[in-house]
Image: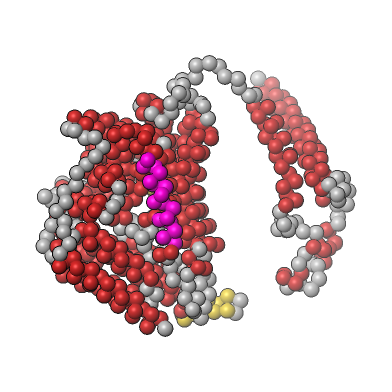
Amino acid sequence: MTTPAWLLEREAGLCPCGCIGKRRKGSFVEKTLNGSAGLLRQVMFSDDLAHRPGLLQRIDPRAKVIGFLALLVAVSFVHSPWMLLACYLATLVLAGISGLPVVFFIKRVWLFIPIFTGIVVLPATLSLVTPGEVVLTLWHWNGHAQGFTAQGLRAAALLILRVAGSVSLVVLLTLTTPWARLLAGLRGLGVPKMFILVIGMAYRYLFHLLTSVMDMYEARKARTIGKQAHDRTARRFVAATAGALIGKSHYLAEEVHQAMTARGFRGDSKVLKSFRFGTVEVAWFAGVAVAAALALGGDSLLVR
Amino acid sequence: MHIPDGYLSPQTCGVAFAIAVPTLAVAARKVKRVVKTRHVPTLALFSAVSFLVMMFNIPIPDGTTAHAVGGAVVAIVLGPWAAMISVSVALLFQALLFGDGGVLAYGANVLNIAIVMPVVAYGVYKLISGRAELTSARRVVAAAVAGYVSLTTAAVLTGIELGIQPDLFHDASGTPLYSPYHLAQTIPAMLLAHLLVAGVAEAALTAGVILYLQRANLPLLQVNHPGIDVEATTERRRFRPIVVAGIAVGIMTLLTPLGLLAPGGAFGEDAPEDLNLGSLGLSAVPEGLNRYAGFWQHAIFSGYKLGGETHPWVGYVLSAVIGIVVVGVVVFLIGKAVEAFSRRDTLEKV
């Protein structure tokens, strides 16, 4: 099931040319609503993807979690920017083989963190922060050339490529594994049952509570005439919404608990165990080992 | 404040996990004992709440918005142990589903945001609110301070973790392998952003939620405040403002010798002969400075050295007392004068 696109569109019903009139946008209520709608769409779409046939989708979730963790550690030990670039390209190939839309995958990775990271590391490329040999002179200060340094640029490239590689690996794991199977995999790896239960239930009720937040915002919007204020009343409304949300969830938790005990819950739960280790998993581990060895071996050659 | 993968070395991540995992295990045991079989739905729902609270954008007076973590709210309503688990699970969602915060860095993020923050928030809240009744304004103030202090603490901790990276992990040419900023850069950056923006948002949210619960949902507040009166029942002994002010001034007077521990003098307050001329690129004390430096030679307790060289702190305390008396008398006289003038003004107008 996917949420229809028209439902998630902003300013539904208004002429896009703006000839009917413009609605003020950019209020914090608007932003939060859009954020939640985007969140719903993203998560629902990625669960669709995880059910498609593909290379990574076939692997046992336990094996996948271990394998990806190993790859993450390997990436964090790589010290050469070229090797990191190769690792990142390898994740793209893996995404392609697994039937993920590669453009969507790249967007998903580069949308959030690496761009943000880029802004964060920009000052580190300057000689003010990272002293070293100046490659591109921007200005002079007390007779010394100041600008981008070789060390600074190298450090920035290392950081951005490492973040991109790591985020790609995590996104690859979550996009190819349905949430329920991922949790079962974590349980199989020895994460305490209580945590798995809490995580699973929190995921379910996240959407429920999100809907009630959206309802509260929508109701306020419907009651508001004129432009939405961005002041003390707005802050009071946000705090009241958060407070009401806490109250609602506390009440809901009581009800859910009663429903659970009525159905025989005694603090214990059963997890479906239909996983097995077969040739696919053995091949996967072999592949992970080869990839990690290549990355670390090639890295030590390049760095030397 | 969520550290992504790649900013921290695997060694740092390992240390963070080594602290976070046992702490969460203790938290799980504590929560299980307190709320019995009810813990699963309660924690699950509060995890969802803390995830959603992290999505709330709070309008800040300058026209921008910032989001709060909400760890302080959950810690006050449910206690620090439950808050640890709720916020950790919310962080897991963010790391796995939205790429906000890393998987290897998950231990570090849990340590900063899910462990240190609720503990600090709860401690500060308890300290300030004391045994005040549930509907008192003191609890709202306590919540605001708790949110502000705890978020800033978590931010400083994040700054420290990021700042130690370049010194510990760099290659032969000195290029940092992970986060490139030093402590001297990360801590001010984190402090500034969180003291001015995010801390204010957290304080506003925490205080606002407590205020709302006082007004609309007292039973929820009572969950984690057993044995505390809802309303003030008996008139409690109140300190008069003058007594409080007197105690504060007294403590400050006794603490003045702390200044002796500080090395060096205040900038721009050196005597001319103490100036480090070499570092300033000067060959002699500037003429004007030399001429006017000794202009006022009639200070009674020059350099606060009343107690002689053997007991410098006696001199400090005595100087402080005399200073307070002198300043107090002057302020009192000015106040009297202003009062007299304004009375004459009003009389004339009438």
In the displayed structure, B307 sits above or below B14; it is above
Q: What is the quadrant of residue A112 in the picture?
A: bottom left
Q: Quadrant of the N terminus of chain B?
A: bottom left
Q: Is residue B200 left or right of residue A177?
A: right
- In magenta segment, residue A122: no
Q: What is the quadrant of residue B103 in the picture?
A: bottom left
Q: Nearer the viewer, residue B78 or A159?
A: B78
The magenta stretch is: B12-29
- Residue shown at 42%/55% (left/top)? B18
- In magenta segment, residue B22: yes
Q: Is residue A119 left or right of residue B238?
A: left
Q: What is the quadrant of residue B269 in the picture?
A: bottom right
Tell me if I can see residue B255 in this picture: yes
Residue A211 spot, x, y in % from top left: 22, 40
In the displayed structure, B27 sits above or below B21; it is above
- Residue shown at 50%/16% (left/top)? B233
Residue B99 spot, x, y in % from top left: 30, 58
